[in-house]
Amino acid sequence: MKLKEYIQTKRIIADGAFGTYYISLYGDGSRAENGAGLSNLPELANIKAPERVIGIHTEYIEAGAQFVRTNTFASNTKSLSADMEKVKENICAAVMCAKMAAGKVDREIYLAGDIGPIPVEGMLHSDRLTQEYIAIGETLLSQGIDILLFETFPELETILPAVTYLKENHDCTILVHFSVNQFGYSNTGLSAKRLIAEANACPYIDGTGLNCGVGPGHMEKLIRKIAPDDTTFLSVFPNSGYPKYLNNRLTFTDNAEYFTEKMEEIAALDVGIFGGCCGTTPEYIRRIAAGISADHPVRKTETEAEKITVPEHPAYGFMERRVKEPAHKLIAVELVPPLNANDEKLLDAAHILKNAEVDVVTFPDSPSGRTRADSVLMAEKIRLETGLCVMPHICCRDKNAIAIRSTILGASLNHITNFLLLTGDPVPILFRQTTKSVFNFDSVGMMKIVQEMNSDTFTGHPVTYGGAINHNRMNTKAETERIRRKMAAGATFFMTQPIFSAEQADVIRQMKKETGATILVGLMPLVSRKNAVFMKNEMTGIEIPDTVIERYREDMSREEGEACGVQIAREFMAMTDDFADGYYFSFPFNRVHMLKKILK
């Protein structure tokens, strides 16, 4: 009987931790008893010491486990430091070990191909990463495994392309488990209830749950806040407790009795599979197998489920005037924070804008990876001194989920409620030896965090945020899809890179047509030929055709150069008037006095 059919009427007891139990038996690779000369990576034993792997699987099955995970959590090119062919060989050996253990008992054992996160530096999403997850999944399926378990993931987005491909091309059951902390958040800042809700809404996922990260007590509290729909089932695989270091080794307290007690409390909820993660041993599984009947029907019970809510009316922030006056073209102006502690020029520019028709003033977050005054603090100072509506940029380069949530909270407490959320420019190569980028996620991931904060924290006064559009990308379809993803993550407006040609305007016009997004078209009124040549050759993401540069003479006076910039900006405003919801100005050298002439 297929797992999905079986789980409709019966609960299943799963195995416990393979890795921590393996290390407790065979040491860390430097101990004398590790006669096979293995490192502390249990997956290497699939080939070098298969009797150990078979033995551990057998212990869990004899303890009462009916659901057993293959010893492949870290079977990937990064963890094994091997090419894909060696990884496949390792996976095949792991499946063979699991089958041999399952064949020792006269009852049905569900074998699940275990797939853990592939360790990567930098950005989490790439075609290469997706292809490796697909290769791992297909290798498991080719060995007769029809259940794939993606576990200990901080988000769904990383694996969704692979999950989709595997489900569309193979007859298999796919389960996805997330890992969160005791407060219910993953290391990408997403809550357990949102993660479970997203997995439930995915037609390619048959079941979801939580594993690792927390002990049974916190797991029980988290599960009470989650209610699956009728098409999926929940699994719980908590740690035995919280680890501590003893003699430079990670150890877990033996608390099987407490663990069993909490798991029995979880059993009163709508959970289908019960197992263990780090620190749990066959003894833990033996106890919960005795305390939770595998034949007990799964019953729907009322929980403290908190559905993810979206405000009936989106937060408009600086766009409120646009809502009241649909014909109004929004005007945003960028002021770049200083490289040093002297903000005199920026303040002068801000006071000029105070008397201009500006809807919002924005502040980049250390653009080009060069340290500048903090965008949020700079925005707050300008807000206090001028009363202007401000919007700091926040990028993922320098901040993890904790820092981003903290920044948004602090800004909101200081009445800053508009944000431009960006992935951010990478750190320049020159500084990478001493300065490391964070990039736990991209701008879409950050938007999901803020979307969740609007749902949970800012329920009465949600913040407004938007994203950037790079119309100069080679793959405009991919950029259009990113716009859709950002809109789904709560983005209510978009600002583009500066445009300098009719072709660039047409690309944005098409993006507007396909997505319906609110778009502020970027304009950069260049002030001299030297300025134009520098921007063309030195600034990534900005494309300036020679026809624009040729309009600037070498011998132009300052006034003539600015007049040329004003004229070109007016031309592009007229060119985009049919679809632009507003304009996003970035003036070289903060020459914001040009705005009045442009809007005249």
Image (cartoon, grey):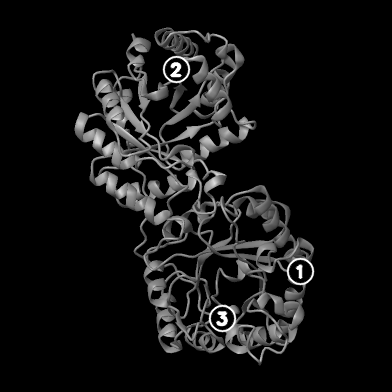
Pointer 1 with pointer 3, Cβ within 8 A = no
Residue assigned mark 2: 525
User: Mark 2 or mark 3, which has the lower sequence index?
Assistant: 3
Which dot, 2 or 3, sits closer to the camera? Answer: 2
Q: Are marks 2 and 3 in contact (CB under 8 Å)?
A: no
Distance from disc 2 to disc 3, alpha carbons, whole Å, reads 61 Å
Task: Report whether residue 586 is seen.
Answer: no
Q: Residue sitting at 51 percent across and 52 percent down?
A: 201
Residue hosting label 3: 20
Q: Amino acid at mark 3?
A: Thr
- Name the element at disc 3: helix
Image side of residue 410 versus residue 594, left or right: left
Q: Measure the C-alpha gap from mark 1 to mark 2.
A: 63 Å
- Residue 27 position within the rendered picture, expressed as x and y whole percent measured from the top left: 61, 86
Q: Earlier in the sequence, mark 1 or mark 3?
A: 3
Please name the residue that numbered disc 1 is placed on: 144
